[in-house]
Image (cartoon, rainbow, N blue to C red):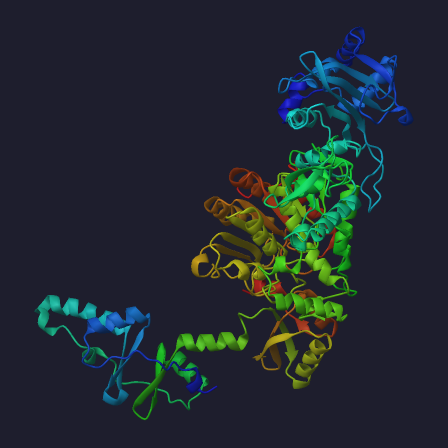
Amino acid sequence: MAEYGARVAGGGGEPLPERDIVEGFDLLIAADRLFGADLNPTMIKKSGKGTPFLVRRPPSRHRMLALWRELFGNRVSPKVFLDALAPEVLGLAHDDGLLLFGKDRVLYDCQIVRGSEAVGHLTLAFYREREPVFRFLPFPRRPGRRIVFIEGISLSAQSTGYASSLFRHYERLFHGLGFHRFRLKASLSVGKYYWAKEGFDCEDRVQFREMRGKLQDLVRRFDLPVEEREIRRLTHAGDVAAFRRDLKIPVYRNPEGYYAVTRDGSHSEEILFPLGKAFLLCSDPWDGYKVIYTDTPRRTGLVWSEGFLDHGAQPGHPESPKRLEALFGAIREEGMRETLIFLEPYVPAPESLHAVHDPAYLEAFRKAVARGERHFAVQDCAISGGSYEAALLAAGGVMAGIDAVLSGRSDNVFCAVRPPGHHAGRDSAMGFCFVNNVAAGARYARSAYGVRRIYILDWDVHHGNGTQALFEEDPLTFFCSLHEHPSFCYPGTGRRLERGKGPGLGTTLNIPLAPHAGDLEILEAFEREVVPSIEAFRPELIFLSAGFDAHRDDPIADLECTEDAYVHMTRRVLELADRYCEGRVVSVLEGGYNTESLVASAIAHIKTLQGREGSPCSSARG
Amino acid sequence: MFVGPRMKRDLVTVTPGATLKEAARLLKAHRIHHLPVVEEGNRLVGIVTDTDLRNATLDGMIVGADRGDSGRPVTVGEIMTRELVTLSPGDTLDDAMLVLSRQRIGALPVVEGERLVGIVTKADILSALLSTLDIEGLGVRIEVVLPRDVKEVARLIGALGDARVEVRSLVLAPHGSDRYAAFLRVATIDVASVRNLLREKGFAVGELSDFYEGR
């Protein structure tokens, strides 16, 4: 897709000289295709019909140039851009295509025609976002995302596939031009289902949760055979659109083409649709968006929720909410907001964890929290009032990450979850872990998406005994752990001779490292053993149990890694993931107890996941 | 720590008349190295090991080459060790360890009178040690050097108890003439804090580097 941008810019992706841009302006003005526009919002008609603004003389060349530079980085000339906006698709073309320059935005307005017959209308606006939309923490103001706003689209004939094809073309075009998002406003109500199906999500998360609630109401009202937990795991409007295709319900259409779930005077024509589609067709309008581009070579998702902070800890406990607060503060300070796709986790139903934990164990955990106890099972596992929900949310975070990666909404994902999970076994909490997030994720990827071969690489300094125990008999889940030698380090398992059991013999690989091993030793072991094992296993999905406590500044163990080791391993894993599983990597935070080294390592890791060049790191082979 | 509860009771045995071939088959099939040789009534008369078999085969080949087939041993009775070191179920594991170590042998038959009732091998002793030291249990090892005073040991245990540290195992060994070395396995991930706590209380806690620089 990057190539497309280069082609638009006329080679190399370098900005065009300003005289080319001005030449383009002049050409369009002479052809009566470029105007100024009065964009006083009260003047903009919402109907999407006719011209929704007052057209006037273009502003000065100087102002137009400044705006063009801000929005398009001079990577495309106005004439080429206007042509690129009007491809002929499915026998439909654009006529009367105009570029309009407002104070802070450029608009595109056109008729959609079949031959000489007008069949529709399209208005787009291009601007740069100013206001932070990410609500729970204020971001410093900085040049915001570039937005393609779909002001209006109307077609006399529905369901022609035209809009799908056109917006697929636009997605490539605007990805190349560095635009971050499509946005659309609620008044484009008829297409609610269409937009969700095309990957648009609710801009407003509160609104999305309401949408999910209404779906639940609908299910209850008609007593449909749908379980609450199925609805709870929906995190994206696209998931709703595809929800329960197997279950058809009737909806009622009125002559204007609007739908309702109950028959009344005007909504009289009965049609059967799959549940998700039927629900969205009848739902309230919502503001939508879709991520086009993230400023980085790979689109990386970030699973994050304030809910992870609700698992409090007693003073002096190393696994504290401060870990994540510091990490998130750094993500903000590094200006990574625009470059990450924020993913919302959900609290999964306890039943969805039964593939990894005994129901009685989860229930005992819930009760211990409810009774207000200070520890669960062992002294290490301190709990507070929010611990149960937070632990479930952490597993749900991994599931939401898997949803994003396997549905293609992001290339890979970092799940900044806590409490960590890799020590938690089927019925045991230990080492700060309650619910095995990665294991729950692996089982979910298998049951919900049919992923067969899963490789789990655990580079936390401690052996992932919980994960190993859950998969040691499973030949399709490869568990590999790099950790400090068990004779010196918690939990005292993960010796070389632990290689799996029964049918899973050989798909467990433990690589203990001597105390004080550093980047050189860990990378040497990584290249010599981990890489060949991934190559031999050919996974369809790779999980990282990414603890950052092997860092030399971490207080809790004795390895001496630096960020460089994490950058190198991340890069190599991505290369292998590209080769075997379309780059699909789900990375899940485990340990890391010195906030500074945790933050530095995790940021370097995330940036590498995004495909950015990290700090130089010495190859283990070099 | 008596031998009785730790010894292996379901035994693979042979009679003196069994062929070497049969003995070799049994050793291989059961993946063992020692075959007690018994007569009627489980009366122990000897033991034959894989080494005995190997030596007999080699001898037979060498001697047989000199003088034809006739001298080659055929039965277990011909090659078994007859002078046996044995234990009784009332002996202790200490006895077993001392004998195994001093005599440099791999297994000790256990007899009641002349009747064979069990066998104790080096592997049995190792697994007894593993479970005593809880090597496979979850936890981390800490090493503490103490003055040779049982009050210091009490203070150490008290400090761990006050901090509610779960101790999985504790081995107290003499260290020089006036000190103890205590080997503890504690079940906490935050072992750094435990080490620091003990140091604050004035205990000499081994550094990891001790293992490395001292080797």
Q: Is residue A532 left or right of residue A584?
A: left
Vertically, is A158 above or below B80?
A: above
Residue A211 percent location from the top left of the image: 75, 45
Determine the residue positioned at 65% across, 85% down. B150
Q: Looking at the rendering, in which quadrant would you find the C terminus of chain B?
A: bottom right
Q: Is residue A552 left or right of residue A31?
A: left
Q: Nearer the viewer, residue A95 or A381?
A: A95
Q: Nearer the viewer, residue B105 or A251?
A: A251
Examine the rendering and report whether any part of residue A238 can be seen.
no
Q: Quadrant of residue A554?
A: bottom right
Residue A271 percent location from the top left of the image: 65, 38
Residue A395 percent location from the top left of the image: 66, 55
Number of numbered callouts drawn:
0
Examine the rendering and report whether any part of residue A459 can be seen.
yes
Vertically, is A321 above or below A535?
A: below
Q: Quadrant of residue A374?
A: bottom right
- Which residue is the extreme one toward the bottom? B113
Residue A272 percent location from the top left of the image: 64, 40
Q: Nearer the viewer, residue B42 or A184?
A: A184
- Which residue is the extreme one toward the top? A30
Q: Nearer the viewer, residue B103 or A247?
A: A247
Determine the residue positioned at 66% across, 34% down. A198
Vertically, is B3 above or below A306?
A: below
Q: Is residue B70 left or right of residue A191?
A: left
Vertically, is A134 above or below A419?
A: above
